[in-house]
Image (cartoon, rainbow, N blue to C red):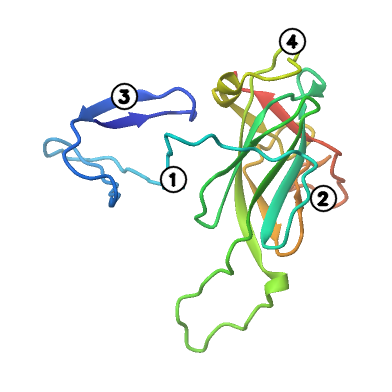
Amino acid sequence: MVTFETSADGSAWVVRREVPRQFSLKSLTVELNAGTPSSVASPGKAVFDSFAMESNPTQALPLYSSPTRPVAGGLAVLRASLWDAAADAPAAWALLEARVNGQPTARGYADAEGRVALVFPQPEPPSFVQQNPPPPATAYTRQEWPVSVFASYRPQSPAPRVPDLKATLAQPRATLWADAARTTPLTKVTLRSGQQLVVRTNEAPTDAAPGGRPLPVLLITPAG
């Protein structure tokens, strides 16, 4: 069967349609479209954003990096210490995801102390459409890439010493915070070539006057 599902939070999914599979799944083309079954005078607008095509192996168990894992050449790493702002405690076993430059989503979950590391291939330099004159070259050591970050978290009291993997991966979406006052959700960060990316919450809102310092942790609050 081919199943079409939608989700508002990436955790709870609603089946919209199912059709028998009548073709090989070895080579697929993805098409996104929207419309109505009949003519309407004032149709709405559909917006598609942040599309990601990912494989879904059925005979593989994903491995997740230890928070203290050293990183070899050719790999990038995102590190964070997730802190439950509501409970004022480590966000034990929270799930963290990152998407960069069209690569498959990098996933990992925090340990009992809220520490997490996402290790993924170093992105390629961004390509430019042919321009005349061409843009000035940028050294690879100065390349930057935007990284979208997402979190899922359901607090447990007391936090288990060893998590249940199925329950951990099924946690609902949570909010990461850019500032300590929790006024601005954190959704994007910047990865720089040759540098590990340590993501932390800032003391002041990002649009406030300069001078705010980053906290030692990344604040997170559960959904709802």
Local secondary structure at mark 1 = loop
Q: How many marks?
A: 4
Local secondary structure at mark 2 = loop
According to the picture, the residue beneath numbered tag 1 turns out to be 54
Local secondary structure at mark 4 = loop
Which comes before the other along the chain, label 3 or label 2? 3
Q: Is residue 194 left or right of residue 6?
A: right
According to the picture, the residue beneath numbered tag 3 turns out to be 15
Which comes before the other along the chain, label 4 or label 1? 1
Q: Nearer the viewer, mark 4 or mark 2?
A: 4
Picture coordinates of residue 74 (x, y %)?
67, 62
Instruction: From the viewer's side, name the closer residue of 60 and 39.
Output: 60
Quadrant placement of the C terminus = top right
According to the picture, the residue beneath numbered tag 4 turns out to be 157
- What residue type is disc 4 on? Ser
Q: Is residue 41 left or right of residue 76?
A: left
Which comes before the other along the chain, label 3 or label 4? 3
Which comes before the other along the chain, label 3 or label 1? 3
Mark-to-mark CA distance, 3 and 2: 47 Å
> Which residue shows up at 84% across the image and 52% down it?
210
Mark-to-mark CA distance, 2 and 1: 40 Å
Q: Is residue 171 visible?
A: no
Which comes before the other along the chain, label 2 or label 1? 1
Picture coordinates of residue 154 (x, y %)?
64, 19
Residue 43, compared with residue 141, is above or below; it is above
According to the picture, the residue beneath numbered tag 2 turns out to be 209
Q: Is residue 90 visible?
A: yes
